[in-house]
Amino acid sequence: SQKIEQNSEALNIQEGKTATLTCNYTNYSPAYLQWYRQDPGRGPVFLLLIRENEKEKRKERLKVTFDTTLKQSLFHITASQPADSATYLCAPNTDKLIFGTGTRLQVFP
Amino acid sequence: DAGVIQSPRHEVTEMGQEVTLRCKLISGHNSLFWYRQTMMRGLELLIYFNNNVPIDDSGMPEDRFSAKMPNASFSTLKIQPSEPRDSAVYFCASSLGPAEGYNEQFFGPGTRLTVL
């Protein structure tokens, strides 16, 4: 069955460092992959979309990579800030989005 | 634009009662998604509509769940009868195009359902 794996444990990093979150998927070949941010008590908010023919996508301090051979996407936040603390969800897509369970990021001063 | 609107924001009910959740799409969007989120299972797609037509309802847990789109801008998700295991946060999301296209989804604030 289709499966998405994100680090279930929280990622704690110091302000100013680069945070790297991992998304691995198995048993399907998504045409693209989306990343969302979710804050407590709120719905997910779209951040970035990367297509299967794109190796890397950037938006301000965010960078996403997509390796279809490894079946993996990496999500990087450079110069992290306490305001970046949230849960980040990856969502590979074939005919619909399937969301991972998310990784909680905590950036401390 | 006000974004996706969901009501109620919180619902507490007793087992066996009927629950109706409501969602208003962003104007101009033609795809509607209902999700359920729990700690154990994460964010699960229940049903997806495109142009008011149900496209994929494979995530609907059982016959107790039903969803409708009576018009292009409004949807309901009904649970009858409700059970304690239905307790979760239910999200509605809309997008400008179909799920298989390169379309971001816009989520509502969610309805937190508690079934006692």
Image: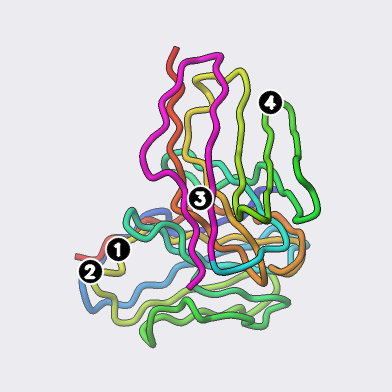
* Amino acid tagged 3: Pro
Marks 4 and 3, Cα distance to the nearest angstrom?
A: 26 Å
Q: Residue at x 80, y 54 (%)?
A: A53
Marks 1 and 3, Cα distance to the nearest angstrom?
A: 16 Å
- The crowding category of the residue bearing disc 2, from other C-alpha atoms within 10 Å (few below 14, some 14 to 19, many at least 20), is some
Q: Label 3 belongs to which residue?
A: B109
Q: Chain of mark 3?
A: B
Query: Could you say which disc has been placed on residue B84 in the image?
Result: 2
Discs 4 and 3 lie in a common subunit: no
Colouring convention used in this rendered image of the protein: rainbow
Which marked residue is nearer to the observer: mark 1 or mark 3? 1
Marks 4 and 2, Cα distance to the nearest angstrom?
A: 42 Å
Report the front residue among A89 and A2. A2
Q: Chain of mark 1?
A: B
Report the front residue among A68 and B44. A68
Marks 2 and 3, Cα distance to the nearest angstrom?
A: 22 Å
Query: Could you say which disc has been placed on residue A61 in the image?
Result: 4
- The crowding category of the residue bearing disc 3, from other C-alpha atoms within 10 Å (few below 14, some 14 to 19, many at least 20), is many
Residues shaded magenta: A1-26
Query: Could you say which disc has been placed on residue A35 in the image?
Result: none
Whether residue B14 is in magenta: the answer is no
Residue B16 in the figure: left or right of residue A7: left
Q: Chain of mark 4?
A: A
| Tag 2 secondary structure | helix
Q: Chain of mark 2?
A: B
* Amino acid tagged 1: Ser
* Amino acid tagged 4: Arg
* Amino acid tagged 2: Pro
Q: Label 1 belongs to which residue?
A: B87
Discs 2 and 3 lie in a common subunit: yes
Whether residue A18 is in magenta: the answer is yes
